[in-house]
Amino acid sequence: MQYYEDVEVGSTATFGEYEVTAEEIKSFAETYDPQPFHTDEEAAAESMFGGLVASGWHTMAMCMRLTAERPDALAALAGVAADNLRWVNPVRPGDRLSLRTEVIEKRPSSSHEDRGYVTTHVEAVNQDGETVVRFDATALVKRRSYDDQ
Amino acid sequence: MQYYEDVEVGSTATFGEYEVTAEEIKSFAETYDPQPFHTDEEAAAESMFGGLVASGWHTMAMCMRLTAERPDALAALAGVAADNLRWVNPVRPGDRLSLRTEVIEKRPSSSHEDRGYVTTHVEAVNQDGETVVRFDATALVKRRSYDDQ
């Protein structure tokens, strides 16, 4: 677990593996993003993607899962922001996604001395080394020294 | 269905209702964001939120559902970007979310004359009129005149 004090701006990491299935793509999309290129193989084949692709918000949920499972995850109190989010390549059944991260900023909270903001640039990369989505995520992170209060 | 030609910069809309349940908050979080303030009422009561709250990415998925169900939804080919995303208030069991939108930009694709980019400022608002999340979403949208090609 990384507390605010542990975080070094400029530090990088690569981690995780998320196997994407057609069943999960369709199940997520039926609940949250029922556009035909996410829910129906035949309709998807006619779309600009030429086949079934994951909802962009499903891809973000996968990235969150990989982030939460990371052994040295941030001691996050809350997620507060995401900036510059770009879905740059489709996510398809059979893809295996991992994350590449770089801490780009940290700053103390001006209102609470027990926490601070950490901004991380994240790229989700598929098995062919292609970036599928990139974004800058900002989390509110606990200071170690206040964790027992 | 709104095609690229139909979209007017500055046009606004308010629509949708999404009822948030504790069961769905925990189910989403167990799959995609297993942090204790999303999965466990007791742990959540000890968190800075004082009770169970939805994953921010779950809230985005709810926003997508409301967007996809809108009767005059964009004729979207793909989602391409999200900017300035801020989770400004927690989403709790029993909340009812609706969306307020304003089209803030449109521009033709420079590479494909059958489509263009539309950027919409979105605010998700709860039953008390509080904004819970705001963001600017950019979609690639079909031109009506090319839809049958």
Image: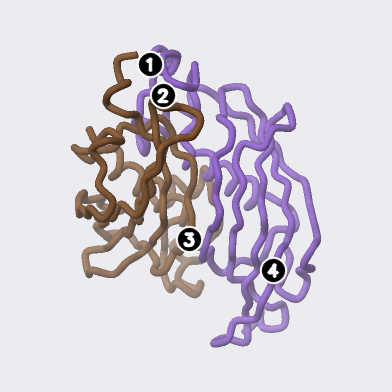
Chain colours: A purple, B brown
Name the residue carrying label 2: A37
Residue A19 percent location from the top left of the image: 63, 30
**Tags 3 and 2 both on a single chain:** no
Label 3 to label 1, Cα distance in Å?
A: 32 Å
In this orientation, does residue A135 appear? yes
Say which residue appears at 36% left-offset and 39% top-offset. Answer: A32
Q: Are marks 4 and 1 in contact (CB under 8 Å)?
A: no
Classed neighbour count for the residue bearing mark 4: other residues with Cα under 10 Å, few (<14), some (14–19), many (≥20): some
Amino acid type, residue under disc 4 in the picture: Glu
Name the residue carrying label 3: B84
Chain hosting mark 4: A
Amino acid type, residue under disc 3 in the picture: Asn
Name the residue carrying label 1: A43
Where is the N terminus of chain B found, in terms of image quarters?
A: top left
In this orientation, does residue B39 appear? no
Classed neighbour count for the residue bearing mark 3: other residues with Cα under 10 Å, few (<14), some (14–19), many (≥20): some
* Circle 2 SS class: helix
Name the residue carrying label 4: A105
Chain hosting mark 1: A
Residue B42 percent location from the top left of the image: 47, 66
